Image (cartoon, rainbow, N blue to C red):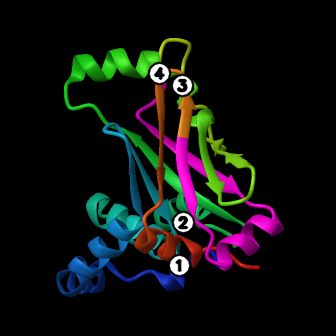
Amino acid sequence: MAALTHSDLMTLEAYSKYLKENKPKLIAHRRARTVHLGEHITLQFEDRETIQYQIQEMLRVEKIFEEEGIQSELDAYNPLIPDGSNWKATMLIEYADINERRRELARLIDVEDRMFVEVEGQPRVYAIADEDLDRETDEKTSAVHFLRFEFTAPMRAALLAGAGVKLGCDHTNYPQHIEIAPEQLASLVKDIRA
């Protein structure tokens, strides 16, 4: 998928009008690319459309309209667009109660490195996490991480041929795995090239 450029973005006024007409469609697209792993971890798999929406939202909320600010947002978010050999995701660790969240983030140090995708008939692929900057300390992990799952050519071929996929975590304090639902998998396979 090609990186977004300034010419791909709408003005704040045009985006406001577009959003009024297309918000349900944008939300449905995001939902089709969201996978819940247990009660507390959600992966939002990114693509060009989700990243464009994110950039447009940042520009709208922050009222950014100058060239330098727009380019800064493009530079920050473009690396989250898959390039045909991988899936990229924003991982959210969610606990409603602040005290429970604080306790669990301390127990989940390195959880981002224990996330995996397993294409049917292929070995597990562990996430490459937080390539932009480290998001944890010695005391706790962050509630947000950016993950990349890099696939080999045989894995991509299996995905394109309709193989099932398991998403999981083998962290001691959060052992979970699920089969990615067919409708979600159909959306994610669009990110892969042979």
Q: Are marks 2 and 1 in contact (CB under 8 Å)?
A: yes
Category of crowding for the residue at label 3, using alpha-carbon neighbours closer than 10 angstroms: few (below 14), some (14–19), many (at least 20): some
Earlier sequence position, callout 4 versus callout 1: 1
The residue sitting at 60% across, 34% down in the picture is 114
Rounded to the nearest angstrom, the CA distance separating label 2 from label 4 is 36 Å
Gap between marks 4 and 1, in whole Å?
43 Å
Which-is-in-front pick, marks 2 and 3?
Answer: 3
Q: Which mark is residue 136?
A: 3
How far apart in space, not on screen, are marks 2 and 1 (Cα)? Answer: 8 Å
Q: Amino acid at mark 1?
A: His
Secondary structure under tag 2 reads helix
Q: Position of 109 compared to 31: left or right?
A: right
Q: Residue at x 75, y 65 (%)?
A: 155
Of callouts 2 and 1, the N-terminal one: 1
Residue at mark 1? 6
Task: Work out whether mark 3 precedes mark 4 in sequence or the reverse, and give the earlier one.
Answer: 3
The Cα–Cα distance between marks 3 and 1, rounded to whole angstroms, is 32 Å
CA gap between label 2 and label 3 equals: 24 Å
